[in-house]
Image (cartoon, grey):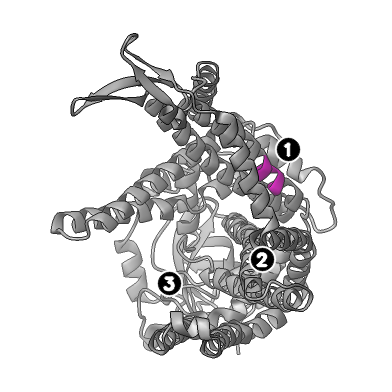
Amino acid sequence: MASSDDTSVTGKSSEPPSKPLISTYIIDEFHHRHSPPPSESDPSSSSHYPTTITYNNQSPRPIKDLPFLLLFLLFVISTFAFGIFASLNKNPNSPSSVSAFIYDIRTDSCIKGQTSSSIIGDTDRVLFLNLLRSDSGYILENLILTVVVTLILSIPISLFLLFSLKHYAKQLVYISLPFFVIVPIFIDLYWFFACTVNSTCSEKFPLGYRIIVMVFVLLVIGVMVWIFVLNWSRVELTVRIIRVSADALSNNLGLFGVLPVMILGLIAYFAPIVVFLVFARLNGEIVPRGKHGKVFCEWKQDGWVPAYYALAILTMLWSAAAMVEAQVYVISGTIAQWYFSKEDSSIKRSIRSSLRNAFGSSSGTICFSGLLIAIVRIVRGAVDTAANEDASGMISVVLRCCVNSLLSAFEFLNKFTINFAAITGEAYCASAKLTYELLRRNLLSAVVVEIVSTRLLAAIIFVLSAIYAIVVCVILKAVSNLGVDSYFVAVVTFIVLLLILGFLVHVLDNVIDTVYICYAVDRDKGEVCKADVHEIYVHLPISRNHNPSYLNARTPLLVFDMLMIFSDHSLFLRSRVSASLKPPARKVSSEILPPQGSLVVFNEVDTPKTSKRPEVAPFSLRDDIYGHLRGFRFRFCVLYNLR
């Protein structure tokens, strides 16, 4: 049986097959749609893009985007140089002391009056001491203590959340979803009845206002529930994606030590710039000015100070955006080393090598990306400000629409650029171009990785933060005399814990994006570095409107070798069956269908012959899918259903 199959497959049998493998209609269409060699027409040929995209962390990477690194250094050096000049050239008299100066007719200048500054200083000191001794000081003391305890407890809470997502992601998600509805409803109803009972609150908020607020909150909760209901078919897939990303992050816990240190480094870097801005404000003089026949003293700022303010603020915005991109780069580089490593091998110095690449060979790429992100945020902020100031006018509406469309297009192209640059070490523009081509030729989408994962994680951290805030409020009411102010302290702790857990969600989102790009590189090469990742990411939708609900457990992930027969050519193909691929682009009638297990070619490509005889594995789908064979692109249709 095996020999006969081999003979029929390789074309050595003298007997013709009982059924035609390829219909006449498709053969004619095949010749009609003959395409030139890939080097002439195929955009994915080696003249424009590499045949295969590989991850190599061993060899040193060349420096990329050097002009943008030099431009960034020029901004930083100029900011510090003018800042040092501003601190040395400052006026000992601040603008706030203008009221202490009077105009002297004899010298035609402003001189300091007899006002004693020591009295003002003593008054401020007394006011500060009174503040500490008052009820506000007691509230501040409890607030600081509670926030410090929250910061300490946030570490074990974050680790608990991470390992729960790794081992019990499904249970945690399904337990948190009801609380995502119950907790806001409980808080809403509790506030309504508590305000109704309290006479002071009832006077400030009449019954009509309380009902409006309660109904509005319930409507917001209903909208959130509706969003989850619409995406319910993807919840199971999302849970598996979250579990994989949590597993990858738990294997690189050193990131939780490096990333906060990078943030602290940014704050330390900002501190002297803020001091320079304060000193720059003191560069000027108090001069006399006449108005309505009277002469008085006013502060006149030096002409270069506004320009320095603009330079320093732009440098800070650029630096902040570049630091965010550097964090994404370090996360992507570290996770990529985990992904492409062997199962039984241990990863050493992965974070160190990622930091070396981020602040070394790829620092220009990070500066370029940070510059673009900063420009986009400035433009978007300007557009939003203009929209708030003047919402009328057809021209302004059209202009805002065009600007928002361009900004959205940039964000679409920039989504995976830094992730790809961290994996391959390419320049920014090359990474953006290669990322788009990598996803396009592998029938993947840069729009949808899995937006539901972010919403689910946001719901989980909201529930945890709300429960923690409720516990804090109960404890404060039991052990302190804060009274109503305990609600304020609980809200502050809720915000603090939500921000910390939100940082964890931000890291997990970047891990998901990085694993997605690594999976695309794997799929492009026909390799499987992490089989569990392929089993999950293969089911991602290819568009926002694509719903992979038809998938079930009987649709396995298959990495197969197959032999495709057309005329006298035999082609060796190694590809991956994807369960989330679009339906056939061309319908073929059942009368001319080839036998099951055959392949129908719609587009001809130049492909080398091979003498290797592969084994044909069973297929599980009937879909129009894209494949990749030694750098050449083609489309084929699998006509076999596995029951």
Whole-number angstrom distance, CA of label 2 to CA of label 1 = 45 Å
The residue at the far front in this view is 114
Q: To which residue does mark 3 refer?
A: 544
Whole-number angstrom distance, CA of label 1 to CA of label 3 = 38 Å
Image quarter where the N terminus lies is bottom right
Q: To which residue does mark 2 refer?
A: 493
Query: In the rendered structure, does residue 455 fall within the stretch colored magenta?
Result: no
Label 2 vs 1, first from the N-terminus: 1
Whole-number angstrom distance, CA of label 2 to CA of label 3 = 36 Å
Crowding at mark 2 (Cα within 10 Å: few <14, some 14-19, many 20+): many
Q: Which residues are magenta?
A: 259-264
Q: Position of residue 342 (x, y in %)?
A: 79, 55
Label 2 vs 3, first from the N-terminus: 2
Image height check: is 464 above or below 500? Answer: below
* Secondary structure category for the residue under label 3: loop
Q: To which residue does mark 1 refer?
A: 58
Image height check: is 39 above or below 284? Answer: below
Label 1 vs 3, first from the N-terminus: 1
Discs 1/3, front: 3
Q: Amino acid at mark 1?
A: Gln
Q: Position of residue 408 (x, y in %)?
A: 37, 56
Q: Are the residues at dot 2 and dot 3 in contact (C-beta closer than 8 Å)? A: no
Which residue occupies the foreground of this view, 294 or 286? 294
Q: Is residue 541 left or right of residue 271?
A: left
Q: Amino acid at mark 2?
A: Thr
